[in-house]
Image: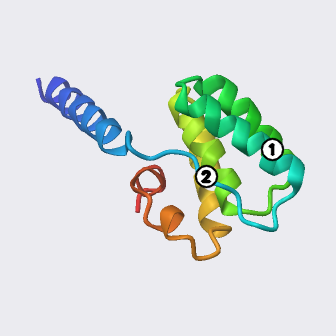
Amino acid sequence: MKKIISILAALALFSVSTTVFAGEGPLALPKGADDKAKKHNVEGIDHWQQGHYDVALKHFSAASQADGSSGEVHFNEAISYDKVGKHGVATKHFGVALKKAGGNPQILNSPILKGHLGM
């Protein structure tokens, strides 16, 4: 009985947390980012807004490969991995995003990032 209650509580927390995080979306890349990275990021944002999270992830990953120096690019990958259910990979990218945040409050104060990183 105790195990069932624990599982139900965990499921309830998960459903609440995904609702709380639902408002977070991808970020624009900083001014000095590579042009190819910016192009893929813009395309990723467009697909994200249409709900095509798997396609958005492909663009954000391409942006990261072109220029992985910013926290924003890793944040965008992380939220996309989260949306497609790859939470372990999302957590890794949230960690990199935090390290490379450069003071960006959208990253530093992100509820979904904090949730994944246990902050």
Is residue 87 rendered to the left or right of residue 68?
Answer: left
User: Which label is found at residue 75?
Assistant: 2
Q: Is residue 12 above or below residue 41?
A: above
Measuring 82% from the left and 39% from the top, which residue is drawn there? 62
Taking the image as drawn, is residue 92 in sight? Answer: no
> Which image quadrant is residue 4 in?
top left
The N terminus: image quadrant: top left
Give the SS element for disc 2: helix
Q: x%, y% of residue 89? A: 63, 40
Residue 99 in picture, x, y percent from top left: 65, 68
Q: Position of residue 12 (x, y in %)?
A: 21, 32
Count residues near mark 2 (Cα–Cα under 10 Å), then give few for <14, some for 14-19, many for 20+. many
Name above or below for residue 98 compared with residue 47: below
| Amino acid bearing label 2 | Phe
Looking at the image, tell me whether mark 1 or mark 2 is earlier in sequence order: 1
Badge 1 crowding class, 10 Å Cα cut-off, few under 14, some 14 to 19, many 20 or more, is: some
**Residue 5 horizontal side relative to residue 17, left or right:** left
Q: Is residue 29 left or right of residue 10?
A: right
Label 1 residue SS? helix
* Disc marking residue 39: 1
Q: Up-down: is 6 above or below 119?
A: above
The residue shown at (70%, 52%) is 73
Q: Amino acid at mark 1?
A: Lys
Specify the color scheme. Answer: rainbow
- Name the residue at the left extreme: 1
